Image: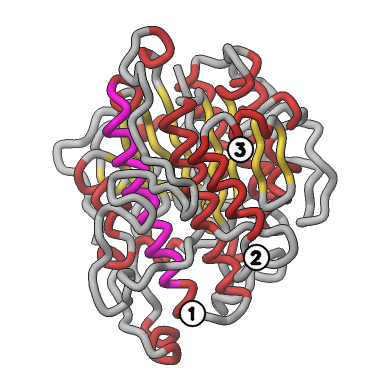
């Protein structure tokens, strides 16, 4: 089996992503093609041997993590009071994230929707990014990471386990906007391909071997970090690099981490938060357009979309002082998922359940630790006679 893990936050939207209208199904980067950054002079083509036997005849998974995106925005829509203060239309959820809703309506399932049984939560107790990524990728409810300044993980992650059975380093990759994700992705980041933020990189030669990927990497390194800070890379460069990497390198496991919804929320910019969420949803459309060009590998890919934490009642904040920010959500679609709509969860789910689900799909050994989560079996059960649909 093969895995592509994508952690998505928000991309600075182009002019076409106006809050007054409907977002297109394909996103700002590709509309079906991963665009080359300005100045590369290179056209985008489907790589040779795209539908070859062997590696492509393996199952794949895409994990999309939207940094700091609330369940309310995904399942209900924009907050009317916040939207009024920001001077934007309070779009319903299906207009705010049309690609996510299309996945659930047509071929997928969602866990954590309101009124659908037990919730999905981050274990915490501090509901911030690095603890969330550690829990998602290690599959453990208890980790040594308590805040965003914790040391690099010593736990083997699902990335490490995928690398142990991979044919080459480029089969497992982390491409993220926030540089600190490197601390959570692997106990041995040098063993996999990493491009986290503008500065953290492992196996640069893999990106340099393709002129379009090299162009995305160089453009992102030179970009202003806004709406982030320091070594942050704007999401449009991260997403462009990741989609190109997916199509050309065809990794077994790819983690894409985008972060702009969280960055705009911390700036108290609700308009920017909503626009970046819509742009991130466009990346999901671009991702599926890319998979559609990838033949057997694309057909055998399963996609997960989640967040690294929730938000407080005041959307600007999250963390241990805001217990409501523990609540999260997950959408899944693709080769391994029955079309179930909104799943009525019969047990509490945690971030720690994501890695065991990935291990099951990749036929990796199960984690037998008492701290380990359990696979999200409800995603694979046969659908009921009538499944709920997104509101």
- Furthest toward the right, the residue is 151
Q: Quadrant of the N terminus?
A: top left
Q: Position of residue 199 (x, y in %)?
A: 73, 49
State the residue in front, 205 or 321: 205
Magenta residues?
Answer: 274-295
Q: CA distance from mark 2 to mark 3?
A: 19 Å
Q: Secondary structure at mark 3?
A: strand
Q: Position of residue 66 (x, y in %)?
A: 50, 54
Q: Quadrant of the C terminus?
A: bottom left
Q: CA distance from mark 2 to mark 1?
A: 19 Å
Residue 141, above or below 112 = above
State the residue in front, 269 or 356: 269
User: Which of the two labelled residues, at mark 2 and mark 3, occupies the earlier sequence position?
Assistant: 3
* Residue drawn where x is 79% and y is 52% of the image: 146
Residue that numbered label 1 is attached to: 270
User: Which of the two labelled residues, at mark 1 and mark 3, occupies the earlier sequence position?
Assistant: 3
Whether residue 77 appears in magenta in the rendering, the answer is no
State the residue in front, 17 or 76: 17
Residue 295 lies left or right of residue 144; in this view the side is: left
Residue 317, above or below 125 = below
- Please tell me the numbered disc located at residue 225: 2
């Amino acid at each position: 089996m093969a895995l592509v893990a994508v952690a998505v936050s928000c991309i600075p939207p182009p002019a076409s992503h106006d809050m007054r209208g409907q977002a297109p199904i394909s996103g700002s980067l590709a509309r079906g093609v991963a665009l080359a950054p300005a100045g590369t002079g290179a056209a985008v083509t489907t790589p040779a041997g795209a539908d070859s036997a062997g590696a492509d005849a393996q199952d794949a998974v895409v994990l999309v993590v939207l940094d700091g995106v609330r369940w309310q925005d995904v399942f209900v829509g924009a907050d009317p009071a916040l939207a009024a203060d920001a001077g934007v239309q309070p779009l319903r959820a299906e207009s705010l994230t049309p690609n996510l809703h299309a996945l659930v309506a047509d071929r997928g399932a969602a866990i954590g929707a309101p009124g659908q049984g037990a919730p999905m939560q981050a274990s915490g107790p501090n509901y911030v990014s690095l603890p969330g990524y550690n829990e998602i990728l290690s599959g453990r409810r208890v980790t040594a990471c308590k805040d965003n300044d914790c040391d690099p993980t010593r736990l083997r992650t699902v990335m490490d386990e995928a690398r142990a059975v991979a044919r080459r380093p480029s089969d497992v990759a982390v491409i993220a906007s926030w540089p600190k994700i490197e601390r959570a992705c692997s106990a041995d980041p040098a063993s996999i391909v990493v491009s986290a933020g503008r500065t953290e990189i492992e196996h640069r030669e893999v990106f340099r071997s393709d002129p379009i990927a090299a162009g995305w990497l160089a453009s992102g390194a030179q970009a202003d970090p806004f709406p982030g800070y320091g070594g942050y890379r704007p999401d449009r460069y991260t997403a462009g690099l990741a989609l190109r990497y997916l199509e050309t390198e065809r990794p077994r496991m790819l983690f894409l981490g985008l972060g702009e919804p969280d960055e705009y929320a911390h700036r108290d910019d609700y308009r920017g938060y909503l626009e970046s969420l819509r742009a991130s949803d466009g990346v999901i459309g671009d991702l599926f357009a890319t998979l559609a060009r990838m033949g057997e590998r694309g057909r055998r890919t399963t996609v997960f979309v989640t967040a690294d934490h929730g938000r407080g009642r005041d959307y600007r904040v999250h963390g241990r002082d805001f217990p409501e920010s523990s609540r999260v959500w997950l959408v899944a679609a693709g080769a391994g998922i029955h079309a179930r709509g909104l799943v009525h969860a019969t047990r509490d789910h945690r971030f720690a359940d994501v890695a065991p689900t990935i291990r099951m799909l990749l036929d990796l050994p199960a984690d037998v630790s008492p701290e380990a989560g359990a696979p999200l079996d409800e995603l694979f059960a046969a659908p009921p006679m009538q499944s709920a649909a997104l509101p």
